[in-house]
Image (cartoon, rainbow, N blue to C red):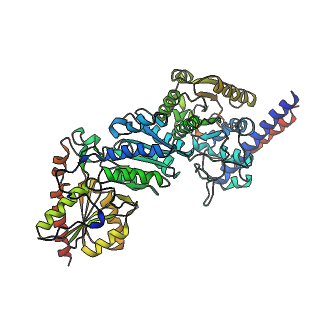
Amino acid sequence: MAAEKNKLRELKLRANAIRQDIVKMLLEAKSGHTAGPMGMADIYTALYFGVLRHDAKNPKWDGRDRCILSNAHICPVLYATLAHAGYFPIPELMTLRKLGTRLHGHPHRNAVPGLETTGGPLAQGISTAVGLAIAAKMDGKKHLTYVLTGDGEHDEGQVWEAVMLAAKYKLNNLIQIVDYNNIQIDGPVDKVMPLEPFADKYRAFGWNVVELADGNDMEKVLDALEKARALSGRSDRPIVIVAKTLSGKGCSLFEGKYQWHGRVPNAEEAKTALSELDAERKKIEAQA
Amino acid sequence: MANFELSQNARLAGDVFSGGLVKEPTRDGWGRELVALGAKDRNIVVLSADVSSSVRTNWFEEKYPERFIECGIAEQNMASVASGLAMEGKIVFFSAYGTFSPGRNWDQVRVGVVMNKLNVKFSGAHAGITVGPDGATHQALEDIALMRVLPGLVVLNPCDSVEAAKCARLAAAAPGPVYIRVGRENTPVFTTDATPFEIGKAVVLKEGSDVAILATGILVHEALKAAKKLADAGIDAAVINHHTIKPLDDESVLHYAKKCGALVTVEEHQVSGGFGGAVCELLSSAHPAVVVRVGMQDRFGESGPAYPLLAKYKMDADGIVEGAKSAIAKKSQKK
C-alpha cells in the first residue's frame, strides 16, 4: 500500500512539473495552445510514467506500445512528457516554435525521438492509429496502439470513418482516449456542435467504452487505463476511454474557459499560474 | 512530306497505328502488376474505397485477401490508414477515382503520406475526360496539379497498360510516396516490355526538328498520330513521352526547347497547374521558348463518349496538329 501511495504521489508531482514546464514553454514561445495541454497533463503522465511499454533509450523498440496524438495542437504536453521521460533534454522545451527547433508548433514525426506521427489536421491521427493497429494484427504483434483525440475533433467526419473501420477489423489492440473537456475554439463543444450522447454513439459503433469521470484525478486515470488494457485482452472490440477533463487544469485563470484554447499566458498570467502550481506541488508533497 | 520514323530505342510495337493493337485501360496494367508484386513481397498491402473492381485492385484481393483492406467509401480515412500501415513497414497501394482521391483526401495525402515520406503508392483512377459518360463531376482534370505541388512526391502518368505495370513495379521499389494516374478507357497498347522506363527520364519516341510534342498519359498515342499527320504536311515533329511529371526531365525539355524552339505540351488535364504548367515553369527562367498547351482550357467537361470528347476539347490528334502549327507560327513571329 505504501509503495502504491508513493507511486501515486510521484505521478502527481510529475504531472505538476510537466504543467509548470508547459506554462514556461508557452510563455517563451509567445504562441500556442494552453487549455488542452494543461488539461491532459495527468493522462500523459499516467501513460508515460505508468502504463505504456516504452523505452526512452530505445525509442524505435518494436515491442513498444504506440502512442499517437491526433489532436496534435496540444503537443506542448506531449513534448514536456517526452522530455521528462528522457527522450530529449528538458531545457530544449524552451525552443518550442522557434526557428531551428525540433519542437514545431505541430509535431513532425521523428523530429525528436519518441514522436510517432506528424499531426495537426484533425482526425488524421485516429485513422493512422487504425492503420498501425491493423499492421500489428497482420504481423501478430502484441503491443497496443493508443491514440489521443479531442472532443471537438469529433466534428470531423473522418473520425467516424476511422471508428467504423476499427470496429470492422475488431481492433481490440486499439485504445482511444478522448479528451472530453467541452471546449473548442469557437466556444463550448455542446454549443458549437453537440456530441451527446457521446458514449452511446461509441457503443452503437461497436466499441467498448470506459467512462472516466475525472481525467485529472490520477487514481481514476490509472484505473481507467487499467480497465481499458484488461478489456483489450477480453473482447474483440476497440476501446475508447471518454475522459472528462478540466481544460486549463492547474491555474484558476485558465480552467474551464474556452478562450484559452488557442492563447498563451503573458508574463503576469504565467507568474500566477506558476505560483498556483507551486502551491499545489507543496500540497502534494505534504500528503503523507 | 517529312520523314516519319520512330526512334529505334523506344522499342515500340511494330506498327503503332495498326488497328490490330491490343486495347485496354491503363488501370488493367496497374491492377495486374499489383498481383505480381504481392507474390514477390509479403509487405505489399492494398487498400480499397469500395471501388476495387473499377480500379482493378479486386485482382489482388482475390489472391491475397489477408493483405487487402476494404475501407468502404471513405477516401480520407483510407489515406491516413495507409500512412499508419506504412509506418509499420508495409508498402501500401491504394486506389480510388482521381476526383475523390486525391480530390477529397489531399490534406491526408499531404500531411500523413507525403510530409512523412512514407512508402505509399496511390493511384488516381478514371483520370481525365475519357471517363466520358460519367460526366464532369467524375472527370479528374485537376489531379496532376494537386499532386505536383507536393514537395517530394513522384507523379507518374503512364501512356498505356504496359507502362502502367512498369509504374507500379518501379513505384514499389522506389523509396517514398508515388502518385500514379490511370484511366478507364480502352486505349492502344503501343509500348512493349523492352521500351525504356526509368522514373524521371522522358522517352524519345520520334526525333524531329520543327516542333517537339511533349505528351503524357494516354494522349501520347494521339501525339504520335499527330506527328504522322504533321509529317504528311511536311512538318518534322519530335514526340517525347513524359511518363514522369515530377521529377520533370528538365534536361530533355531544355534540349527540345533549344533544338525546336517550339513546344506543344499534351495532357488530359487542365492546362494550368499540370504538365504543361511544369514545362512552362522550367522554361520561363531556363530557356524561354514558345509553348502551346493542349489540354482542358480552364473549363469543366461534360458527358459523352471518350474520343468524341477528346475531339471536342481539341486534345485528340487533330487538336495536337493545330497546337503544333500554332507553335511553329508563333516561333516564326518571334524571329
The front one of B205 and A287 is B205
- Which image quadrant for residue B330? bottom left
Instruction: Name the side, left or right, on which B153 lies relative to A263.
Output: left
The front one of B213 and A36 is B213
Q: Is residue B145 above or below residue A162?
A: below
The front one of B19 and B203 is B19
The image quadrant where one finds the N terminus of chain B is: bottom left
Question: How far across and down, in percent of the image, does residue B84 sit?
Answer: 54, 42
Q: Residue at x 49, y 53 (%)?
A: B176
Q: Residue furthest bottom?
A: B335
Question: How far across and down, in percent of the image, does residue B98 sit?
Answer: 34, 44
Would residue B49 be seen by someone viewing this image from the given angle? yes
Q: Is residue B45 above or below residue A195?
A: below
Q: Residue at x 61, y 61 (%)?
A: A100
The image quadrant where one finds the C terminus of chain B is: bottom left
Q: Is residue B262 above or below residue A111?
A: below
In this rendering, the count of numbered labels is: 0
Would residue B300 be seen by someone viewing this image from the given angle? no
Instruction: Name the side, left or right, on which B154 lies relative to A72.
Output: left
The front one of B279 and B232 is B232
Question: How far across and down, in percent of the image, does residue B247 sit?
Answer: 41, 61
Instruction: Name the side, left or right, on which B120 lies relative to A71.
Output: left
